[in-house]
Image: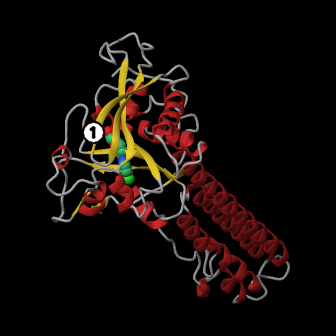
Amino acid sequence: MVPRKSRAFVPRDESLFCWVRNRPGRAQEEVSALSDEIIARLNSARAAALEAVGRAAGASELEEVRIRFLGRSGEITQVLRGLGQAPADIRPELGRRANEVRVEVERALAEQAARLREAELELRLLAERVDITLPGTVALPGTLHPLSLILLELERIFTAMGFEMAEGPEIETDWHNFQALNIPRDHPARDMQASFYFTDDVLLRTQTSPVQIRYMRAHAPNLPVKIIAPGRVYRRDDDATHSPVFHQVEMLVVDKGITMGDLKGVLGVFAREMFGRKTRVRFRPSYFPFTEPSAEVDVSCAMCGGVGCRVCKGSGWLEILGAGMVHPRVLRNGGYDPEIVSGFAFGLGIERVAMLRYGIGDIRLLFGGDIRFLRQFHPTGEGRVEA
Ligand code: 2NL
């Protein structure tokens, strides 16, 4: 509540001093009575001021109190101002007292202002209090996706053997994706790779082979070609072991005098590095349009060591990739002369390797984004699950 402003306690014209001034030759009793009265007024002004200061609950209320008592026409100011007309014998004493009152009220104002600031700060500190014992937001370190882990592993294995990484576009021409790889438009192999076409000539690549075609055409006739081409590929498949988007790594070597023995050697190193030192490799005759001869390559099952288990369905072997000697037509489409050079190639699905390596039963887990699943994988192989 704002205290009601009182007027200056004595209007100038009716001041006590007017009364004294107008009566020269006044009696000593009159002067002392006057002095007593001024002192009484000072005291009551002092008491009222101190009380008002004590009651002021904010900076603006405090300012009102200051104006009421010490302002230009404040109660104490009025007394001080009027002292000029007080009789000379009592003036110094009254002046001293009035000044004391003024100083005292000023100090009380300053102290109350400080107290109010303090209290306000106290309130703010209380309101803005931060509980530093509350648990913070835990920043869980991320983990690499199992597909990334396999890809990094492949990169490590093949770059150690002197291979270069090659990349290319995911949107390809029919020629780079199929025709250059000896798969003409009417070839039955196209049915096995049901594709996503934009136009008759443009599609999402179904394999990373077009990267190798592009690489050969960019580098021919330089030798050797030793590349691995990892990347995302697309096929119209969708079940527990097939995803419409998946990842492939293909490898290509082209040089003079390359034989199937080189292919077997490289695949042996790869299999032992990826699946363990004791891993054995088996070749079965197969067919791909872009290789001749062609082979399905199996590795001995790392789960059971080759005796047969659920993972290898009792056979002791896991089909891991397809490979072969690069077809002469494909070499020629890459800009190399098959009379002078030869080469080998393989292709593998990264998802399949990840599923075998980590014991994942459903390919869709790899694309589900469930971090409870994804957090289990660690470069050291910790936290392996049977899904
Ligand atoms: C598989 C089989 C294979 C290739 C890919 C290839 C690439 C060029 C020339 C010759 Cl440029 N071959 N790639 C060769 C054999 C098999 O993939 O089952 N992939 C998942």
Work out whether residue 297 or residue 242 is closer to the camera in this orientation and state it.
Answer: 297
Asked if ligand 1 lies within 8 A of label 1, the reply is: no
Can you give x and y, in whole percent of width and height, for residue 320 in the image?
Answer: 37, 31
Q: Which color scheme is applied?
A: secondary structure
Q: Is residue 201 visible?
A: yes
Tally of marks: 1
Q: Quadrant of ligand 1?
A: top left
Q: Label 1 sits on what residue type? A: Tyr
Mark 1: few, some, or many residues within 10 Å (few <14, many ≥20)? some
Looking at the image, residue 335 lies above or below residue 134: below
Tell me the quarter of the picture where residue 192 sits.
Answer: top left
Residue at x 46%, y 30% (from the top left corner): 377
Residues 269 and 187: in front is: 187
Residue 6 screen position, x and y as percent: 51, 72
Left or right: 23 with respect to 193? right
Find the residue positioned furthest to the front.
339
Residue 97: x %, y % from top left: 79, 68
Would residue 237 be found to the left or right of residue 119 on screen?
left
At a point 69% along the width and 63% down the height, the residue shown is 110
Please identify the quadrant where the C terminus is shown: top left
Identity of the residue drawn at 62% across and 57% down: 117
Query: Do we see residue 137 in this rendering?
Result: no
Q: Secondary structure at mark 1?
A: strand
The residue where tag 1 is placed is 287
Q: Is residue 144 above or below residue 313?
A: below
Instruction: Name the foreground residue: 18 vs 3.
Output: 3
On-image quarter of the N terminus: bottom left
Residue 24 at x, y percent in the picture: 76, 89
